[in-house]
Image (spheres, rainbow, N blue to C red):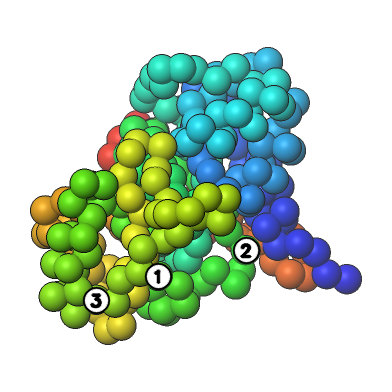
Amino acid sequence: MSCDPAFEAARGALELLPTLGSPRLVGFGTGSTVGFFMDLARGYSSSWLVVASSIDTAIRASMLGFTVLNPPRGPLDVYVDGVDEFDSRGNMVKGGGGALLGEKILAFNSSVNVFVASEDKLVEVLGSRRPIPVEVVREYTPMVVGALENLGFRVSLRVGSGKRGPVVSDWGGVIVDVYNDGLRDPEVLEATLKSIPGVVETGLFIGYADYIVVGLRECGYKVLRFERKRGRRRG
């Protein structure tokens, strides 16, 4: 028997939440795996106030019956989001949906962060399978891309499928994808990327995880616990 590991991870996150107390203000990330979580969590729609990491998530959560705060308020009791890649230390790459800035703001301002991932998202080196999403100031995109290339990175402008031109985030920045071809230390990689003026934020989430719930192909899930280093922490 095989299962959808993304669904299993979302189910595991929902089962984990009651052990963390009685959250009232809950943040939702962006993407398909957290979409499974929102579908499963509809029974909490009357007891949770939701802060969304993107317009897409806000619309979806509202359609599921959740009360979405606009403007958002915090700090959050719990933040739940998906993962594009993660390593054995709990460091992650996120932002495949272009919402990395909102996601990182919410993760920083949450007492507990729960990330959900299928088991195939585990990598030895972050950025080894897919590029690192980076949001840059729109008006200076060519200059920022040039500066990144001068540091030796391969960079591609992310292009939308529903319209011509670059992907523009909910906050007005342009999303570029940076290929990591050698830096194995995620802290050094993040510092290098953010040393370029005009880089608004990166999709590297270093030290943000309290829990990563990993969904398994053979059904079920496992919960990984990490020592949180960034942002608010419970207790």
Residue type at tag 2: Ser
Q: Which residue is at 30% across, 83% downward? A: 181
Depth order, front residue of 50/19: 50
Residue drawn at the location 40% of the way across and 54% of the way down: 166
Give coordinates of residue 211: x percent, y percent.
49, 51
Instruction: Identify the element where label 1 is drawn.
Output: loop
Disc 3 element: loop
Rate crowding at label 3 as few (under 14), some (14 to 19) or many (20 or more) other CA atoms within 10 Å: some
User: In the rendered view, does 86 fall on the left or right side of 206?
Assistant: right
Which residue carries the number 1 mark? 131
Residue for badge 2: 118
In this rendering, the answer to whether 137 lies above or below 172 is: below
- Residue at coordinates 23% horizontally, 55% vertically from top-left? 141
* Pointer 3 or 1: first along the chain: 1
Using a 10 Å C-alpha cutoff, classify the residue at mark 1 as few (fewer than 14 neighbours), some (14 to 19) or many (20 or more): many
Name which residue type carries label 1.
Pro
For badge 3, the amino acid type reads Phe
Specify few, some or many for label 2: CA neighbours under 10 Å numbering under 14, 14-19, or 20 or more. many
Q: Nearer the viewer, mark 1 or mark 2?
A: 1
Mark 3 to mark 2: distance in Å? 28 Å
First-in-chain label (1 vs 2): 2
Q: Is residue 69 above or below residue 129?
A: above
In whole angstroms, how far apart are the C-alphas of marks 1 and 2?
A: 18 Å
Circle 2: element type? strand
* Place of residue 138 in the rendered image (x, y in percent of width and height, measured from the top left): 26, 47
Among all residues in the image, which is located at the extreme right? 1
Residue depth check, mark 3 versus mark 2: number of the one nearer the observer: 3
| Residue 38 left/right relative to 203 | right
Q: Earlier in the sequence, mark 3 or mark 2?
A: 2
Near-viewer residue (97 or 224): 97
Residue 104: x %, y % from top left: 35, 43
The residue indicated by pointer 3 is: 153
